[in-house]
Image: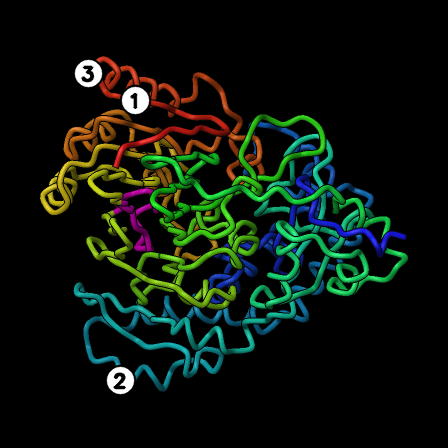
Amino acid sequence: MRDTISYRLADHTSAEPLVNRWVAWPHVFSPVPYCLHMANYQTKTLASYLQNPEIHVKSSRNPKLLGGPFVDIPVDRADEVRALLADLQTRHREDLELAHTLVEFQNTLAGEAKGQGLNSFYEKIPDALGGYVELVYDYLNRPLVRCLESLFYESPHYREHLQSLRLFSPARDDSRAYYMSTPRLPEPQEIEWAVPFASDRIDELFGLDAVARPLGEIRELLGLAPADDRRLLELLSDEPPEAAEPWRGDGVRVRYFGHACVLLEWNGVAILVDPFIPVQPREGGIARYTFRDLPPRIDFVLISHGHHDHFVFESLLRLRRRIGCLVVPKSSGIFYGDISLKLMARKLGFRHILEIDALESVPFLGGEIVGAPFFGEHSDLPHAKSGYVVRFGSELILFAADSNCLDPRVYRHVRNSLGPIGTVFLGMECIGAPLSWVYGPLLPVQPQHSHNMTRRSNGSDAKAALALLDTVGAERLCVYAIGREPWLKYFMALTPEDDDPYIRESNRVLETVRARGFKDAWRPFGKLEFHLDA
């Protein structure tokens, strides 16, 4: 009987991409950062858990320790963690060797290469790195091992067979274990589908967001047996899909989906910025837009940078079939931590990708997308990052993401080139994590404590935000990318409080610009819709 009924993905169903049981994010996808992260974070974190599982579980429940290297797995499953660690140490021995060899050779080169020619050092390149690296100096005669990222993607260190999707339904809320520290062990009520992220079969699965199919076809797609139907039906709905209609009204419709995710629709063109789309839990949860609120086609998706909360695998894969063009910032190609988002997107199955730099433009009928400088937020390390100015007719909107306005003069140049920018979206998470929080596993030499604490991934404070707004000539402000939405907790490790420093700083800005007569000034939470003339 069930095979005569058509089903779609239920609104409460999540599909979490995994790499070898860990949540997929850029540092566990690009091969060289993944090997370093595996060696310097994953193995060490699992080993620490096995020494004292009770402390890890207790620490995972402490709100003050959110984001720490604590494994949130019950004590009675410690043997599974032990097996996972043994797998990393045996089946991934070559990956661990690459990580240790790269760090050791970079430090050796730094000690021996003092400005003389580097040709003779090629004979000293270890076998694990042979043919995959170039040796260069920066302009201060500091030697660097430049990893050729594209070649590493074709090496044994990139393994598609480790990729999978974890299909599950949050029962009452949006909670998940912290993404970086806790691997996803098999759960009886969930389905883990082993499938390369670039596979067209993923588009078939997420086509169920819009078009229902018989249960037998879905079962076959996922490689399941009829005995799995009970689990599968928990993830499906027999209610007809309700796809959102494209915006056909006057002016620009702007919808805020949470964090840094914004949908713009105007004159038949849909642009989505930094997609991080939630699902709706079965019970409870704040009001939100979900995948059902997106148009059938999204002409452009703009990615501001490669941090885990802006380049979100879970949303990008689910939307891939709807996206016309993915726009990403350029990477330097020199530092292995400066991941190429273009190469990554290609390996995720995207076919139309544009990589742009500051003031480079992507035109569309009646408007354009322009790259904007993006300072700060990356602990002073070079990274592919870009703000975006979107022009609809005469209306200009700046998406500054987590930019720190370290030098307002850069925005003077942007304004001189493009004109006054009326609407600004700006992140103000102005404290930020220290250098070692995300980047520690990638560094050949660990920073001094004082350096670590002053080099933070922080955005603008009130002073910087007001300088940016004054310089571009803004009259409308949306403070976003604060990370307070509940579905962000497992990614951002934030426990929102009204007296948080970044809330106090953004309050100062909102009060100031309202007093100055700004047309609008918001710090949205969950969802927001407004309209602009164009």
In this rendering, the answer to whether 440 lies above or below 126 is above
- Residue at 26% x, 84% y: name it: 119
Q: Is residue 190 left or right of residue 135?
A: right
Assess disc 3: are there few (<14), some (14-19) or many (≥20) residues with their C-alpha within 10 Å of its C-alpha. few
In percent of width and height, residue 470 lies at: 16, 28
- Residue at 78% x, 65% y: name it: 220
In percent of width and height, residue 47 lies at: 66, 52
The residue segment tinted magenta is: 374-390
> Which quadrant: the C terminus?
top left
Are the residues at dot 1 and dot 2 in contact (C-beta closer than 8 Å)?
Answer: no
Q: Which residue is mark 2?
A: 119
How many numbered circles are shown? 3
Q: Is residue 18 left or right of residue 102?
A: right
In this rendering, the answer to whether 119 lies above or below 21 is below
Q: Which residue is mark 1?
A: 520
Q: Secondary structure at mark 3?
A: loop
User: Toward which corner of the image does residue 147 lie, by quadrant?
Assistant: bottom left
| Amino acid under disc 1 | Asp
Residue 405 sits inside the magenta stretch: no
Measure the alpha-carbon separation of dots 1 and 3: 11 Å
| Amino acid under disc 3 | Arg
Q: Secondary structure at mark 2?
A: helix
